[in-house]
Amino acid sequence: MLHTLARAEAVAARRAVAAATVRHRHVAERPLVLVPLTTAGEAGAPLGAMVGTDRAVPTLLVVPQPLDRELRFGFFAGLAEALLPEVERLSDEVEVEPATRNREETELCADALQIVVPNSAAVEFVRLVGRSTRFLRTVEDPEAPHPVPVPVPLLGRWLTHYAERARTPGSSLLLAMTELLTRHWATGQSAMEDQHLGALLGWIDPPPGLDGPAAAARAQTGRTPDGLLVSPPAGPATDPVFDNRVLAPALARYDRARAALEEAGDDARRRAEVAAAQEQVRELVASQLRPTWDDVWHGLDLLRTLPEAEHVAERWKRDRWSFTGHRDRVRAGEPPQPKRDDAVTAAQKLAGRETAQARLAAQEALDDPLAMAVRRLSGEAFSGTVLDVVMTWSEGRRPMPRPVLTVATDDLPQAEPGTKAYRALPGARSAQSAELVAVEPRGPEEPERAAPAPGWRVTVKLTGGMGSGRTPKEGSVPQVGDTVVFTLFEHDPRGGPALPDAEQTPWTHGGPPQSAVPGAPAAPVADAPDPVTPEDYL
């Protein structure tokens, strides 16, 4: 409801409105921006890319004939030259994590390379490139039928890791700019239109003299006198008009020049024609990539104006652990990631992503009042004023404090008495636990400091976070008149039970056959299939 309300307000104001008060994702000081461009109708066939960490000096990679295998491999080698040195630089900068009860002293990369792409389609392109290159055989293998440059498989392994990590909610290793912006601003257009970065930025930060709808319309449909889009989609789709009117003739000219060079042999004039045709393709591809390149950096500037949320550093540290773990696997000489995960690995990934999603939702609500308002509206949290505090103690040999709070609130908790509740305490490592005792309508005789009627009177018993003594530690029990926020969801959700090892996984889920388990009876031999007869064919 609040998301729909924000979009309606954006339509009325003719400009995007804030959907968050803080920035919920990490933005690196020196991210690597990648703007890819693919050939229409050829899945995974790159046409070009702009990549780099310097806003003013991008590296331009162009494939003058995307159907040529050697030129595509050269593109991947150029992409590896731009990306892998940054990975190696950050892989060598480490810090020491002290030993804990469950972990020895280990090294952790002090930072990780962050890759930013224009939209979610570009994230899928990164995954596709990683999948198609990590198993290729290099020129070091004399038996390889179509060898590729040496760094290409390593590039595929890193891109595969980044694409897999991007599926973890809250991860910031590989970010789509459109998803970043739509998380922090709400526009007056559809979610599909929000995937066009130029239109999205038109709503958020329109140029002088234009409002949001006009700027978005100009980005989506505005064309120059030669008929090309003012703001090409580039990420990684191309404009059909650009393909048919400009790109196709340039590629045909390049093909004719190459064919003429092959017929004439080593001819200086023919080589110059090939170079001129290739340069024309480079200029055309650069004209489609540069606007999106500038838009991505503009989006980063807008995001940096928001203060970073409190839990962002914790999630970025998890990304650094992921980066460090993959670095260690690569340096240990482990094989590339498999094409398909086994049952245990797939279940572990799914469970980890579910836990990360619950953790992300809880942390965003704790960091951002707008996100908490969504949970309050749905009955998963309530905020109000403390009307009364009654100190009680638990029964037993060692009585513990169990204060009972009466809270006046306008939020209706959607829970039965006895449900666990949680409250964040400043400086505490974990949330304070509580128990919902009763929820009653508030009458007109309530004091003025309570929220105006109609409302609710919620009774909550604190059950933890007050120390181990009979007297609660200072600051753990709110006072009358304080404003408190209780949630009905855990602040740090835990994962499920551990999964069995591969040796103990049933053969129905990818484990070893029963006969391979020591001490197990031999598996029954399957009956031979029926022989094929002439009646089996029509």
Image: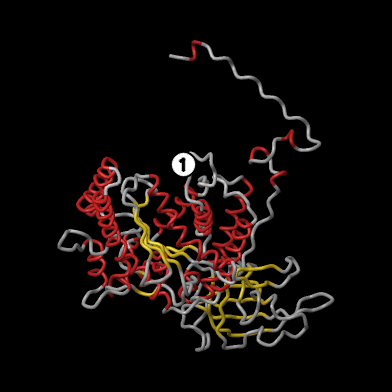
Q: Quadrant of the C terminus?
A: top left
Residue at position x 64%, y 48% in the image: 344
Is residue 316 shown to the viewer in this render? yes
Which residue bears the numbered disc 1?
146
Residue at position x 17%, y 58% in the image: 227
Up/down of 234 relative to 300, above or below: above
Q: Position of residue 295 (x, y in %)?
A: 33, 68
Q: Toward the viewer: 537 or 249? A: 249
Q: Quadrant of the N terminus?
A: bottom left
Q: On the image, which quarter does residue 77 sit in? A: bottom left
Q: Position of residue 481 (x, y in %)?
A: 57, 88
Is residue 414 shown to the viewer in this render? no
Residue at position x 53%, y 39% in the image: 143
Q: Position of residue 423 (x, y in %)?
A: 61, 76
Residue at position x 32%, y 50% in the image: 39
Q: Toward the viewer: 100 or 403? A: 100
Q: Position of residue 85 (x, y in %)?
A: 51, 64
**Farthest top residue?**
534
**Left or right: 386 in relation to 370:** right
**Left or right: 510 in relation to 183:** right
Disc 1 element: loop
Q: Toward the viewer: 296 or 286? A: 286
Q: On the image, which quarter does residue 420 sit in? A: bottom right
Q: Amino acid at mark 1?
A: His
Up/down of 430 relative to 353, above or below: below
Coloring scheme used: secondary structure
Q: Residues within 10 Å of mark 1 (few under 14, many from 20)?
A: few
Q: Toward the viewer: 526 or 166? A: 166
